[in-house]
Amino acid sequence: MNKLETLDGKRRSTQNLTRRPVDKNTWQCYNVDTKKTWQSCGTPARHGGKNMNKDEILAKSRAENAGGDEREKKLRVHRDAFMAWGPILLGFAMMVIKLCKGQSPADIISILFGMVAMAELYNAIQTRKKLHIVLAAAYFLLTGYYFYRFCAGIF
């Protein structure tokens, strides 16, 4: 029989130290020796130290994933960032056309600065960093200036 020395200096048998498959969601494991389907292997503190039944586990999982799982959230963030490039590229193309025709591109510039200002405002709200607050204020001022130039050109 194999013996194992523990931290307290005692020698113990390794016969009962067999690895059993563990389900990380329920923190229960299959007992190979008794051929029982599921046996408690000790629950972590986050479950309150008690075994959870299937309905409790499903309810907790649904509550955690109410806004979508991690992959869906990541896809949404990347989609929104990718989506912003469409108006930016279209705005630059329209600005070049207006400049070639001799017109003022102030309306397009105000829209582009407005998009950047809103992004910086979001960053400022989330991080509360002074840099983002200053940049958001500067972009909003530029947006207002170019919008004023656009309105002054119309009237």
Image (cartoon, helix red, strand yellow):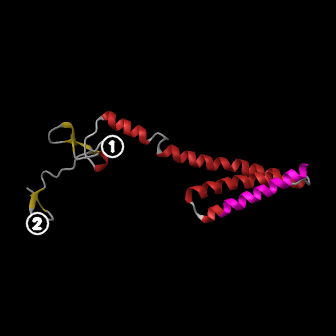
Q: Which residues are magenta?
A: 134-155
Pointer 1 residue: 25
- Would you say residue 138 sits in the magenta stretch? yes
What x and y, as percent, mark residue 83? 65, 46
**Left or right: where 6 falls relative to 57:** left
Left-right relation of 45 to 98 = left
- Mark 2 packing: few (<14 Cα in 10 Å), some, or many (20+)? few
Quadrant of the image occupied by residue 31: top left
Main secondary structure of the magenta stretch: helix
**In this view of the protein, can residue 92 be seen by the observer?**
no
x 63%, y 62%: residue: 132
Q: What amino acid is labelled 1 in the image? A: Asn
Q: Quadrant of the N terminus?
A: bottom left
Left or right, 154 with respect to 8, comes to right
Q: Residue at x 76, y 49 (%)?
A: 90
Residue 8's image quarter?
bottom left
Would you place residue 139 above or below residue 56 in this image? below
Along the line of sight, which residue is nearer the eye, 40 or 111? 111
Q: Which residue is disc 2 drawn over?
A: 9
Q: CA distance from mark 1 to mark 2?
A: 35 Å
Q: The residue tagged with tag 1: helix, strand or loop? A: loop
Residue drawn 72% across and 53% down? Answer: 114
